[in-house]
């Protein structure tokens, strides 16, 4: 008779999972047999497409369309998550947006929208995930950041500031939660081949690749693999900002 795995399935929540890096992360965990919860802010059709891909792999999946920078919306998600899967094992904060342009031309509305998407979403999701992790004395929080949060980028001041905040948030929260055996780390992505970089002209892309020692952009699957490694990593690894950039920065 075939053996049945008696161990309970682990659960991961990935925000911003309708495409690109988030989608790749969700599919990676699903292939590894995890229960997945996925979110996006607008595109229900794309998110449900990812959900169908995950279900086709034989893994349970909860899809939620909502703003992770809104605490009330996050509360609704976490209520559904608890009811559907129970305790959360891993939180992957991937939701975010970028803004290209001179700071002097940026409106306060655009600034607020970006910070809400890229930084406030971490506060909301972590605030709701932490109590359950502390009760169980286990859990991992993985934040998707950017190399621009380390060194800054011209014409991406707001994005750089938000990702710098993500990095500081990661280090501080890791110290706060280490006594509860919860690990918090971040991945500072370089140029990853997603829709966020599709605005580059062929000439601009070629110039960019010349700057990257690896000679290419990273792939979403490479980010997903590193996220999964962090989810399964030693509990002594915490408070780290891991650059995944092909040696660029």
Image (cartoon, rainbow, N blue to C red):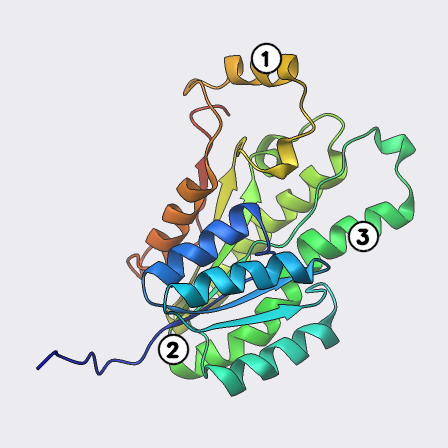
Q: Earlier in the sequence, mark 1 or mark 3?
A: 3
The structure residue drawn at horizontal position 41% and vertical position 73%, both measured from the top left corner, is 180
Secondary structure beneath label 2: loop
Q: Answer whether residue 32 is visible to the viewer in this image.
A: yes
Q: Which residue is mark 2?
A: 137
Q: Earlier in the sequence, mark 3 or mark 2?
A: 3
In the rendered structure, the answer to whether residue 21 lies left or right of residue 152 reads left
- The N terminus, quarter of image: bottom left
In the rendered structure, the answer to whether residue 5 lies left or right of residue 85 reads left
Compared with residue 213, is residue 44 higher up or lower down, i.e. above or below? below
Q: Which mark is residue 207?
A: 1
The structure residue drawn at horizontal position 77% and vertical position 32%, both measured from the top left corner, is 100
CA gap between label 3 and label 2 equals 34 Å
Q: Answer whether residue 185 is visible to the viewer in this image.
A: no
Which quadrant of the structure image shows residue 136? bottom left
Residue 84: x and y in percent read: 50, 83
Q: Which mark is residue 113?
A: 3
Secondary structure beneath label 1: helix
Q: Residues within 10 Å of mark 1 (few under 14, many from 20)?
A: few
């Amino acid at each position: 008779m075939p053996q049945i795995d008696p161990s309970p399935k682990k659960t991961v929540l990935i925000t911003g999972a309708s495409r690109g890096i988030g989608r790749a992360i969700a599919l990676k965990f699903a292939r590894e047999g995890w229960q997945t919860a996925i979110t996006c802010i607008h595109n229900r059709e794309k998110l449900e497409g990812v959900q169908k891909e995950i279900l086709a792999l034989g893994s349970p999946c909860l899809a939620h369309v909502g703003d992770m920078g809104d605490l009330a919306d996050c509360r609704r998600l976490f209520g559904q998550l608890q009811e559907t899967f129970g305790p959360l094992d891993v939180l992957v904060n991937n939701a975010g947006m970028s803004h290209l342009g001179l700071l002097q031309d940026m409106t306060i509305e655009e600034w607020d929208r970006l910070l809400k998407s890229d930084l406030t979403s971490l506060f909301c999701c972590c605030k709701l995930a932490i109590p359950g992790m502390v009760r169980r004395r286990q859990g991992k929080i993985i934040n998707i950041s950017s190399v621009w949060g380390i060194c800054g980028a011209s014409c991406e001041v707001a994005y750089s500031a938000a990702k710098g905040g993500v990095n500081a948030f990661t280090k501080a929260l890791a110290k706060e939660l280490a006594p509860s055996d919860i690990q918090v780390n971040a991945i500072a992505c370089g140029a990853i081949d997603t829709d966020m970089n599709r605005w580059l002209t062929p000439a601009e892309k070629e110039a960019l690749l010349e700057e990257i020692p690896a000679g290419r952009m990273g792939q979403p699957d490479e980010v997903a693999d590193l996220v999964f490694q962090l989810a399964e990593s030693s509990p002594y690894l915490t408070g780290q900002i891991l650059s995944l950039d092909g040696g660029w920065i």
